[in-house]
Image (cartoon, helix red, strand yellow):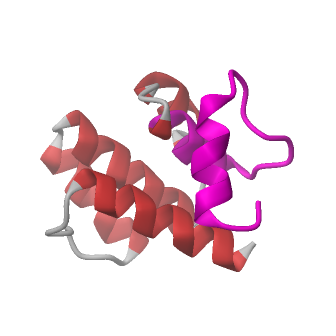
């Protein structure tokens, strides 16, 4: 995936683009409001990127205690920005690193 705009436009497709890693795949499903499919991608994943996405998903769900745990695992503070802004921030960050 080359940039956030291309990633966002791919949300119109019925299936995700090929070759997305678990974290971006989770964000793709989150972008389609498919919380369960998104969560399934990172539920057993390890690493700080997976923890960050996992934290975002639990924040979106409204489970702030669980979100706080995952933000801590990700080494990130609980964000003050909107969920949409956080989704964009995480997605942009992961695209830039891949």
Count the labels in the image.
0
State the image quarter where residue 81 is shown: bottom left
Task: Give the residue at x 38% y 67%.
Answer: 73
Judge left or right: residue 17 versus residue 58: right
x then y, percent, for residue 93 = 54, 74
The correct choice, above or below, for 19 with respect to 16 in the image is below
Is any part of residue 61 visible from this angle? yes
Name the residue at 68% across, 21% down.
14
The question of residue 16 being in magenta is answered with yes
- Asked if 85 appears above or below 63 in the picture, the reply is below
Q: Residue at x 64, y 52 (%)?
A: 7
**Residue 70 seen:** no
Image check: 9 left or right of 89? right
Where is residue 46 shown, x and y percent of the image?
59, 57
Q: Position of residue 22 (x, y in %)?
A: 68, 48
Does the magenta stretch mainly form a helix, a strand or a loop? helix
Image quadrant in which you'd find residue 12: top right
Q: Is residue 88 left or right of residue 10?
A: left
Q: Nearer the viewer, residue 17 or 13?
A: 13
Q: Quadrant of the C terminus?
A: bottom right
Query: Residue at the spot x=73%, y=26% of the render?
Result: 15
Indicate left or right for 29 with 80 as reference: right
Residue 1: x %, y % from top left? 76, 60
Nearest to the observer: residue 71 or residue 56? 56
Please provide the residue range marked out in magenta: 1-30
> Which residue is the extreme one toward the right?
19
């Amino acid at each position: 995936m080359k940039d956030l705009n291309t990633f966002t436009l791919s949300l119109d497709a019925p299936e995700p683009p090929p070759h997305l890693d678990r974290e971006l795949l989770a964000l793709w499903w989150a972008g389609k409001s498919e919380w369960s499919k998104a969560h399934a991608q990172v539920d057993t994943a390890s690493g700080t990127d997976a923890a960050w996405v996992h934290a975002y998903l639990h924040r979106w769900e409204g489970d702030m205690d669980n979100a706080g745990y995952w933000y801590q695992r990700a080494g990130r503070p609980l964000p003050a920005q909107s969920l949409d802004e956080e989704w964009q921030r995480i997605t942009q960050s992961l695209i830039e690193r891949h």
